[in-house]
Image (cartoon, rainbow, N blue to C red):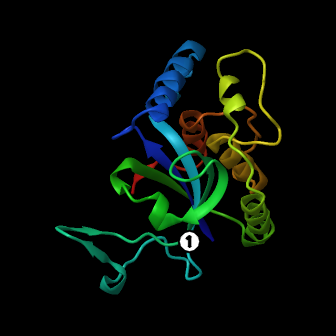
Amino acid sequence: MKLRIAFHSSKGERGIGKIIIAYTWALALVRGDWKSLKYDYSHVEIWWPDEDGDFDCGDRSKITANLNNIKIRFLGYCFSSTTRGPYDGVRIAPASEVLHNPHRWEYIEIEVDDDLWAIIEPVIETMDKQQIPYDFKGLFGFFWPWNIQDKTKYYCSELVSKICYNLKLTKKRHKRISPRRLARVLAKLYHEPKQL
């Protein structure tokens, strides 16, 4: 099956998103991680298709009109840890709800082993039901040389990186990873992010 890792770009970003983008850019610069500089992302989601394997609506019956413009209705579900909207931590949400500004999103599509996904999907659903809080403390780990993450909480790229590792999409489990760095890791293994 195909899975997408969706990255929220800097277009139209405000508040904490702008801070994340600026700080992770500076961190990549200080660390000499030049290849990460081009990935201006503040958030990341795992996006899986609907039961038919579709991510968006290809036929006219599934496209919804919104006043003067046409919006694509995205299918499937997204999984991450976020404080955006009504959420405060780990959650599953309909892709159409998460990706409502498609010009702000880019993605990397990856083929995933069906048997591994069958093991991981129930874990994702359980994590959603547990209402695991957002790891604000973990964000401060980027400011310090030692790891101060809370092992019972997650921020977005920490959670997505863990799932990618468990799906054998990455070779290493990163304890501290930003959306910017995760994009570089996955782009090196698969392909550059594409515009949604």
Q: Residues within 10 Å of mark 1 (few under 14, many from 20)?
A: some
Q: Residue at x 46, y 48 (%)?
A: 193
Specify the quadrant of the image occupied by residue 172: top right
Tell which of 74 and 192 is nearer to you.
Answer: 74
> Outermost residue toward the front?
86
Residue 170 rendering spot, x and y as whole percentages: 71, 46
Q: Is residue 146 left or right of residue 142?
A: right
Could you tell me which residue is drawn at 71 percent across and 29 percent down? Answer: 137
Q: Is residue 64 above or below residue 106?
A: below
- Residue at image location 50% in from the left, 37% down from the top: 42
What is the residue that sits farthest to the bottom in this orientation? 61
- Residue 187 percent across, percent down from the top left: 54, 44
- Quadrant where the image shows the N terminus: bottom right
- Give how far across and how far down residue 139 sits, in percent: 65, 29
Q: Is residue 142 above or below residue 105?
A: above
Query: Is residue 60 in sight in this rendering?
Result: yes
Q: How many numbered marks appear? A: 1
- Closer-to-camera residue (168/68): 68
The x and y percentages for residue 182 are 60, 39
Q: Quadrant of residue 161?
A: top right
Of 118 and 111, the residue lying toward us: 118
Q: Quick check: 195 left or right of 170?
A: left
Residue type at numbered disc 1:
Pro
Q: Secondary structure at mark 1?
A: loop
Q: Can the viewer see residue 39?
A: no
Which residue position holds label 1?
A: 49
